[in-house]
Amino acid sequence: MERIYFDHSATTRVDPRVVDAMLPYFTEEYGNASSNHTHGQTAKEALESARQIVADSLNTSSKAIIFTGSGTESDNTAIKGVAEKHGKKGKHIVTSVFEHPAIANTVKYLSHNGFEVDQVPITSEGVVDLEKLKELVRDDTILVTIMTANNEIGTVQPLKDIGEIAHDKGALFHTDAVQAYGKIPIDVDKMNVDLLSLSAHKFHGPKGVGALFVKEGVTISPLLHGGGHEYGLRSSTENVPGAVGLGKAAEIAHADMDEETERLTSLRNKIIDEVTANVKESYLNGSREHRLPNNANIGFRWIEGESILLLLNHVGISISTGSACSSKSLRPSETLLALGLKPEEVHGSVRITLGRFNTAEEVDYFIEKLPPIIEKLRMMSPLAQ
Ligand code: PLP
């Protein structure tokens, strides 16, 4: 059996159809999309058609989409761009306690540079507390930035309500949809979103290319100054193969979304149900209902998630103990702490995230292999005695 990959929130395999769509733009169609000759215009057409696909998927116009170099860059552009442009109007930003470092460290940077940042807590279900949010947003709040779905526990946030609360006080609403885009439908208009970040490598597209939605009429300052590409918001010669790959990946994800949601939800539920039934003292972290279809985050009392990861790796299964970026640190996950878990419970949690190429057989293999691993670790754990 091939190795099993259950870490799709870290990154995904590029769909072969995406690779095929990208290839010509490295070789035959290598023109610079800003050139006025035929080489350039062919590249430009491909870029614009990718932009249109992303725009359609969010129910907006192509003028509202810019391509970037990553989800992190989209987040930085949105937050610093609003701060610089609207900093005279107010210096207050509201975010949540469980944002990805691309948001958390960007607002932290601003808090050291004259901005005041408040974090809204989450409930024990992993959803932002809307009443607390209402208390935090003020007349001088310029931006509310709250993720669409969390990268560790997969819980989906009530964007429409969050946007309404931000708008009531005249603030802009940015959402980091890096984990959610391509997995759940997002209509920026209906959901009151002004700015939205996404990243191709999370939905079977290539690494190193992202996009940012900036609602028409919303003004931000650019991070990168130069030739004025991407409506003046992201100077750099356009990454045409990357944008084409992102567009193709977005097209496939949206065309197959209903069936894929059903398939992944059923596989994910099987994991949650069988693991929590077969392994005592195990539990699901975060809401089951308001959850991405591909995410199961399960806690096991008295043992270390990192040990589970290593023993599963030994039998050919790749999972994660948190977001990829924090797995090298021994700090307990802020997200799981914010859910109300004790530090020792946080250390005993693992994240299983499914993707397009996972099968029912792989899920069965995982369900069979996991309980003896937990039992073995508990036999060695002084806490479990
Ligand atoms: N935001 C969230 C919620 C993420 O999960 C990630 C990646 O893990 C990022 C932002 C960063 O995206 P990228 O890897 O494209 O910079």
Image (cartoon, rainbow, N blue to C red):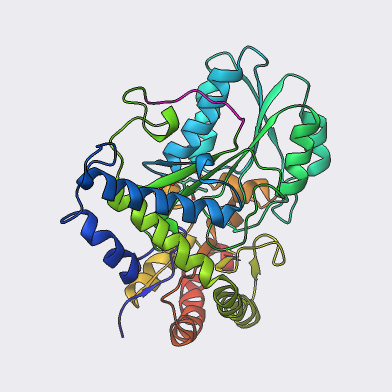
Q: Nearer the viewer, residue 54 or 178?
A: 54
Quadrant occupied by the C terminus: bottom right
Position of residue 342 relative to residue 267, above or below, is: above
**Predominant secondary structure in magenta?**
loop
Q: Residue at x 51, y 26 (%)?
A: 80
In the rendered structure, the answer to whether residue 28 lies left or right of residue 195 reads left
Q: Residue furthest left?
A: 27
Q: Is residue 145 magenta?
A: no
Q: Position of residue 61 (x, y in %)?
A: 56, 46
In the rendered structure, the answer to whether residue 28 lies left or right of residue 131 reads left
**Whether residue 381 can be seen here:** no
Q: Position of residue 303 (x, y in %)?
A: 52, 64
Q: Nearer the viewer, residue 218 or 148?
A: 218
Q: Position of residue 124 (x, y in %)?
A: 74, 53
Q: Residue at x 56, y 49 (%)?
A: 177
Q: Position of residue 357 (x, y in %)?
A: 41, 76
| Total numbered labels | 0
In the rendered structure, the answer to whether residue 244 lies left or right of residue 51 reads left
Q: Residue at x 21, y 41 (%)?
A: 37
Quadrant occupied by the N terminus: bottom left
Q: Residue furthest front?
A: 37
Q: Is residue 219 magenta?
A: yes
**Boundaries of the magenta span:** 217-224
**Whether residue 162 can be seen here:** yes
Q: Residue at x 77, y 29 (%)?
A: 136
Position of residue 224 relative to residue 257, above or below, is: above
